[in-house]
Image (cartoon, coloured by chain):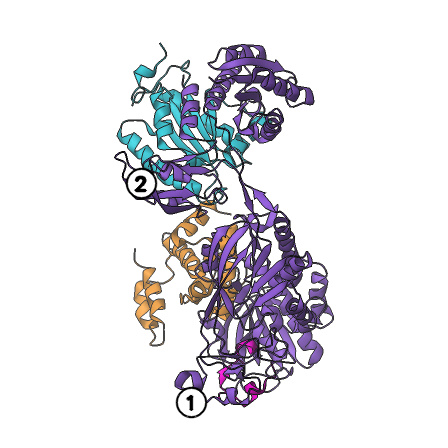
């Protein structure tokens, strides 16, 4: 595996956050002024199980360097069982992406509750750093989608 | 062509200090479809909202993007403002540039850049927003209470008090539940029957309350405000409308050797029986497992002695269907079976009893008429050992992991009552911890020790051995004295753990409510919504939600009633419009979505479609009930044909956001 | 307190002493209780505290019959007998720390001795 030493590389990271836990957790890290890189852009979804694998593939196709999916802790889902579906679906998707040669570190599922602002910020820092080390996503990026 | 307005909030300096709001507003102004882009000091203020309202009217906007704080904060504010200006409130999108941008970043250049991207994503999304209307569904003004113990009775009385009709479904021949079996109640030691039976009578006489005794819930369909419930009225072989409860049949019935479940099997009843003197409804029931007439057609004594002709040996189970707006679950608890605790010799020795059995032994209406006698030889016991935490606080393989909560108090009560009535009796209580939080509870326990001289020993009983002389050897440890004790006891009383009633789990499946691993119903929020289930319209009352004593049960019962009344008061309820919907032309009826729906909101209908060649074809397609759907979106991902989509978070909207961010 | 010793005992017993809720049912059920200086519940507590050397010196180690009554009855699944066994192993594993020599055993065999106890005694000399 090639390790990217370029410190200036700014990865583009898409984070899907469920409305009830993780999005609130992200808000909390803001309220507590806990820094994480600007590279992370959050998309709000009602539940982590709303995230279609297509969205993740689309993000990679359009040039995202990492995708992270955040939901309520297992057992705490606002919709009873949504995050269990997420867990299964993403296990499958990520192992497929792994098979395709997309490094495991580019994708992640994390459980962040509405009270875990610090965990959210720490996760984002860590994840951004991991993706930064991997360098730009080339395998799944569709060059036709690149800005001219 | 879309006409979108962008409004960037400074939030004082909260946003403006790290995000160059002017640049954000100017850049977003060049986005496709954006006709007006403004920034303002406080967008959520009255004048800020007016700015938005005026812009909507002036520019005839078709969509609004507010770049401000979290949508969890002010989404509703701006939706209302939009609605006031005549724009559908669901055409408003918020870009969160405070909590998720200005507050976490320090560098103005990169923060501004991020704010622009977030704004751009919101603009891209709002392009695809559709106007949504929150639906309304009517509320049936009738409540169902499942379980007729003290919890169910209290809930029903409170709902009836507010003027709504309530049905109680009770699986036993009488209401009253566990409290009817209890002798005295702690910490005041007033007799349970004296405070419960008036309530039972009140429930039976209340014009708003219908009691379906000896009945079970067979099927639940529908959703909040409109549940359709099928109730199975089990055959009691006695016409309820005719029986006067005179009890002559129970005296004359020749089959007298039926274990009496009301007295915990400590004495016998007849095959036709009334559970206890104050039963409500006071109607006889024939036990088909023992009745000789029903078993082999030879007897018929009861029908001969019945002066009103109420006996009907041909009665069948009946089903009635009823509609309800709200359902309250009050299924209560049972003590656990003690079969697997061999060390306590419960199955070997009749003088080892559970606490509920001791309640009956001490009750004036019990098998011994209130005199405490050993079940084996009917002699007065002189040494009684109480064992706490039997099956509670255990490893999952050994029993229940939770504390049953009521045992410490009722054991103190039993010990005290015995010492009061029979001062010559020595009472030992083996405890691990004495847990007596509650008003006047610890004082009560201390009274047992200080005033009644009950021997409280910290330690656990390891082995109970019945001896040939009728005594019982109790081997236990005294942890404080660090010694092993052997007590020569006459009776051993086990404080068995309590567990939810066995009917609770199938009921939870019918109601699509959540349960924990111990089969207790899960409340919607452990602190702030303790009497509601996560399923709308289903409320929880009493020990079905967790171990509880009587005061707590009654408090929760009234709280559940208040919540149910709050729902029944409404003529209709507004539904969340951000729900799933299926494109019938794409749906192939595969049932994938139905399986993942946690609310049972998806059903299948056969629908006629016109084919291109002008023929018609009937196809099975999914249909979402918008009143039940909560909008999680699990089905949208499960759908293999892409027919299922979610309002407000549609596939195309999220894709547009992804595209805008990755541009 | 000897941390390594505690870790060794915990690892070789496989028991989680932190699950103990101090009910004393292990000691209540123990047939050798009166023979022991330290009782099963004390074993569990002292291992939790890391006070293992005291236990290793105590005769109590060899009074435990390994009858597993405490393991069977413990409501929390702590498995005190396994803790005792682990401390015993810690004692006999020390070099030259054997309490008995193997040829002493045949004389001590007893018809009434539970088979488990014989196996336990022999296990001490397995290595």
The residue that mark 1 highlights is B298
Horizontally, residue C101 falls left or right of residue B477, namely: left
Q: Residues within 10 Å of mark 1 (few under 14, many from 20)?
A: few
The image position of residue C17, as x and y in percent, is 48, 54
Q: Is residue A127 left or right of residue B480?
A: left
In this rendering, the answer to whether B601 lies above or below A91 is below
Give the drawing colour for chain C.
orange
- Splitting the image into 4 quarters, where does residue B380 fall? bottom right
Q: Please tell me whether mark 2 sits on a helix, a strand or a loop.
A: loop
Tag 1 subunit:
B
- Segment tinted magenta in the rendering: B245-267
Colour applied to chain B: purple
Q: Which one is in front, B188 or B656?
A: B656
Rendered location of residue B186, percent (x, y) = 68, 67
Q: What is the quadrant of the C terminus of chain C in the image?
A: bottom left
From what the image shows, is residue B650 above or below residue C58? above
Is there a contact, CB below 8 Å, between mark 2 and mark 1? no
């Amino acid at each position: 595996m090639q390790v990217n030493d370029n410190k200036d590389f700014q990865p583009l990271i898409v984070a899907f956050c469920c409305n009830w836990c993780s999005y609130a957790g992200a808000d909390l890290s803001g309220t507590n002024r806990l820094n994480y890189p600007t590279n992370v852009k959050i998309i709000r979804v009602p539940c982590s199980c709303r995230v279609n694998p297509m969205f993740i593939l689309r993000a990679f196709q359009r040039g995202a360097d990492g995708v992270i999916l955040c939901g309520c802790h297992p057992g705490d889902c606002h919709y009873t069982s949504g995050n269990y579906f997420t867990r299964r679906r993403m296990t499958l998707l990520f192992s497929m992406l792994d098979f395709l040669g997309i490094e495991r570190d580019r994708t992640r599922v994390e459980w962040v509750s509405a009270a875990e602002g610090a965990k959210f910020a720490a996760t984002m820092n860590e994840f951004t750093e991991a993706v930064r080390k991997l360098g730009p996503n080339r395998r799944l990026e569709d060059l036709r989608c690149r800005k001219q | 062509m879309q006409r979108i307005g962008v409004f960037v909030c400074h939030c004082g300096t909260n946003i403006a200090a790290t995000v160059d709001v002017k640049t954000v507003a100017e850049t977003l102004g060049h986005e496709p479809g954006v006709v007006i882009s403004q920034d303002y000091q406080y967008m959520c203020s009255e004048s800020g909202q007016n700015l938005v309202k005026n812009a909507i009217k002036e520019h005839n906007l078709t969509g609004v993007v507010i770049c401000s704080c979290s949508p969890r904060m002010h989404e509703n504010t701006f939706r209302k403002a939009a609605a006031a200006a005549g724009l559908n409130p669901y055409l408003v999108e918020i870009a969160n540039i405070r909590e998720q941008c200005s507050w976490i970043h320090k560098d103005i250049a990169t923060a501004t850049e991020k704010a622009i991207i977030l704004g751009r994503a919101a603009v891209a999304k709002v392009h695809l927003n559709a106007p949504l209307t929150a639906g309304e569904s009517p509320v049936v003004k009738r409540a169902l209470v499942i379980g007729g113990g003290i919890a169910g009775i209290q809930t029903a009385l409170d709902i009836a008090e507010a003027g709504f009709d309530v049905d109680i479904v009770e699986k036993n021949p009488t209401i009253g539940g566990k409290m009817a079996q209890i002798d005295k109640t702690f910490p005041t030691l007033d007799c349970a029957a004296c405070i419960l039976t008036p309530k039972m009578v009140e429930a039976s006489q209340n014009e708003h309350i219908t009691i379906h005794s000896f009945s079970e819930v067979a099927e639940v369909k529908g959703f909040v405000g409109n549940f359709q419930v099928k109730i199975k009225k089990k055959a009691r072989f006695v016409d309820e409308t005719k029986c006067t409860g005179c009890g002559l049949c129970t005296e004359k019935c020749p089959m007298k050797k039926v274990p009496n479940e009301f007295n915990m099997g400590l004495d016998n009843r007849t095959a036709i029986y009334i559970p206890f003197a104050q039963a409500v409804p006071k109607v006889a029931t024939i036990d088909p497992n023992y009745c000789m007439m029903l078993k082999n057609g030879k007897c018929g004594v009861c029908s001969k002695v019945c002066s009103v002709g109420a006996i009907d040996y041909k009665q069948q189970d009946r089903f009635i269907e009823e509609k309800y707006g709200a359902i309250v679950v009050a299924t209560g608890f049972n003590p656990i079976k003690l079969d697997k605790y061999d060390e306590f010799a419960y199955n070997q020795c009749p003088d080892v009893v559970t606490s509920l059995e001791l309640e009956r032994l001490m009750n004036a209406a019990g098998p011994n008429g209130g005199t405490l006698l050993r079940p084996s030889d009917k002699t007065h016991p002189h040494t009684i050992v109480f064992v706490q935490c039997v099956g509670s606080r255990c490893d999952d393989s050994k029993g229940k992991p939770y504390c049953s909560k009521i045992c410490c108090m009722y054991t103190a009560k039993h010990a005290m009552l015995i010492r009061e009535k029979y001062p010559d009796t020595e009472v030992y209580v083996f405890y691990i911890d004495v847990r007596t939080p509650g008003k006047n509870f610890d004082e009560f326990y201390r009274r047992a020790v200080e005033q009644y001289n009950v021997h409280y020993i910290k330690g656990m009983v390891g082995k109970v051995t019945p001896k040939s002389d009728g005594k019982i050897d109790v081997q236990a440890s005294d942890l404080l004295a660090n010694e092993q004790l052997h007590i020569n006891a006459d009776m051993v009383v086990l404080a068995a753990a309590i567990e939810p009633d066995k009917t609770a789990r199938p009921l939870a499946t019918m109601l699509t409510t959540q349960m924990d691993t111990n089969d207790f119903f899960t409340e919607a929020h452990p602190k702030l919504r303790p009497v509601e289930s996560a399923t709308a319209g289903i409320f929880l009352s009493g020990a079905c939600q967790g171990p509880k004593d009587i005061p707590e049960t009654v408090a929760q019962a009234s709280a559940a009633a208040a919540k149910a009344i709050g729902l029944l008061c409404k003529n209709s309820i507004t539904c969340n419009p951000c729900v799933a919907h299926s494109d019938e032309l794409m749906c192939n009826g595969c049932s994938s979505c139905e399986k993942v729906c946690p609310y049972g909101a998806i059903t299948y209908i056969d629908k006629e479609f016109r084919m291109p060649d002008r023929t018609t074809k009937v196809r099975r397609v999914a249909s979402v009930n918008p009143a039940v759907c909560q909008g999680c979106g699990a089905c949208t991902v499960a759908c293999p044909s892409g027919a299922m989509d979610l309002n407000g978070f549609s596939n195309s909207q999220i894709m547009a956001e992804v595209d805008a961010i990755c541009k | 307190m000897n941390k390594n010793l505690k870790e060794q005992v915990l690892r070789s017993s496989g028991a989680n002493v932190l699950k103990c809720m101090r009910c004393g049912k292990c000691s209540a059920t123990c047939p050798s209780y009166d023979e022991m200086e330290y009782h099963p519940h004390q074993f569990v507590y002292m291992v939790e505290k890391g006070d293992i050397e005291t236990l290793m010196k105590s005769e109590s180690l060899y009074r435990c019959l390994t009858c597993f009554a405490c393991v069977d009855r413990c409501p929390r699944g702590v498995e005190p007998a396994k803790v005792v066994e682990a401390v015993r192993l810690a004692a006999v594993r020390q070099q030259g720390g054997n309490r008995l020599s193997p040829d002493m055993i045949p004389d001590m065999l007893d018809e009434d001795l539970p088979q488990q106890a014989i196996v336990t005694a022999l296990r001490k000399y397995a290595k």
